Image (spheres, coloured by chain):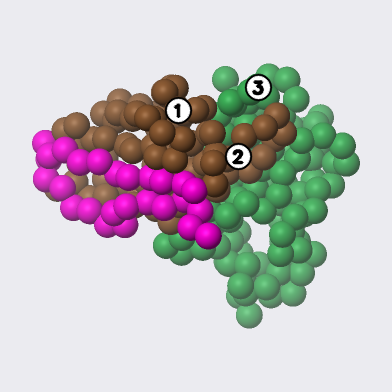
Chain colours: A brown, B green
Amino acid sequence: NAGVTQTPKFQVLKTGQSMTLQCAQDMNHEYMSWYRQDPGMGLRLIHYSVGAGITDQGEVPNGYNVSRSTTEDFPLRLLSAAPSQTSVYFCASRRPGTGIVELFFGEGSRLTVL
Amino acid sequence: AQSVAQPEDQVNVAEGNPLTVKCTYSVSGNPYLFWYVQYPNRGLQFLLKYITGDNLVKGSYGFEAEFNKSQTSFHLKKPSALVSDSALYFCAVREPKKGGKLIFGQGTELSVKP
């Protein structure tokens, strides 16, 4: 019963490096999203997807790319990391349907950019 | 644009006393409101939600929330706090449309002392 799985849990990058944060869910959820959590600012939505092949921008999309080639996976790419991207990143998903349902969150990925 | 505010960064309560964590929102149309809890180094967990109906919503771990449309508030409450309730609490509002985004408040740190 894995739920939402994020890898890696911890990562240290140098400014300018690129990397991908992985997110996978095994609940057949259509909707997936990425948030970043910073002290005093709560969670801010980076990108989201309502299904395979469909992505859209959230509140703070600059510096991040996403793709959704399968229902299960929703990777977040940092093309050229900056210190301002030091944060804890959370992937979340919710099940399909017309009802208003809650998000399921991964355990988070802590990223430090030096 | 929708938004949610949690006016208190921290709430301190003695064990056994009632607790309230405040949340106000702004959204066009009928609001879909949520409370989540985050324990240290973990992802967020769903507590409860308001979609329609009774203004008093009951959720997990003995928590409840009161929806007040005239005051645009959705305060989280518990009649008798436990030390184990100490955590970070987030209020969130969802856009009232298919695929609507979930926007979070900045969070309130609840500390329950024995």
User: In this view of the protein, which residue sits in the foreground, B1 or B46?
Assistant: B46
The quadrant of the image that shows the N terminus of chain B is: top right
Q: Where is residue A55 in the image (x, y as percent from the top left)?
A: 42, 24
B103 left or right, relative to A89: right
Q: What residue type is labelled 1?
A: Ala
Local crowd size for mark 1, using a 10 Å CA cut-off: few (<14), some (14–19), many (≥20) = some
- Above or below, B1 relative to A43: above
Q: Which mark is residue B97?
A: 3
Q: Nearer the viewer, mark 2 or mark 3?
A: 2
Residue placed at 27% from the left, 50% from the top?
A111
Q: Say whether residue A44 is visible.
A: no
- Circle 1 chain: A
| Residue hosting label 1 | A52
The reply to the same-chain question for discs 1 and 3 is no
Local secondary structure at mark 3: loop
Q: Give the magenta-colored segment's residue range.
A: A1-26
Q: Mark 2 points at which residue?
A: A95
Label 2: few (<14), some or many (≥20) within 10 Å? some
* Chain under disc 3: B
C-alpha gap between disc 1 and disc 3: 19 Å
User: Residue A107: x and y, percent?
Assistant: 43, 56
Residue B4 left/right relative to A9: right
Among numbered discs 2 and 1, the one appearing first in the sequence: 1
Q: SS at mark 1? A: loop
Disc 2 to disc 1, C-alpha distance: 14 Å
Q: Which of marks 1 and 3 is in front?
A: 1
Position of A57 with respect to B111 (left or right) is left
Quadrant for the C terminus of chain B in the image:
bottom right
Residue B8 colored in magenta in the image:
no
Q: Where is residue A13 in the image (x, y as percent from the top left)?
A: 15, 48
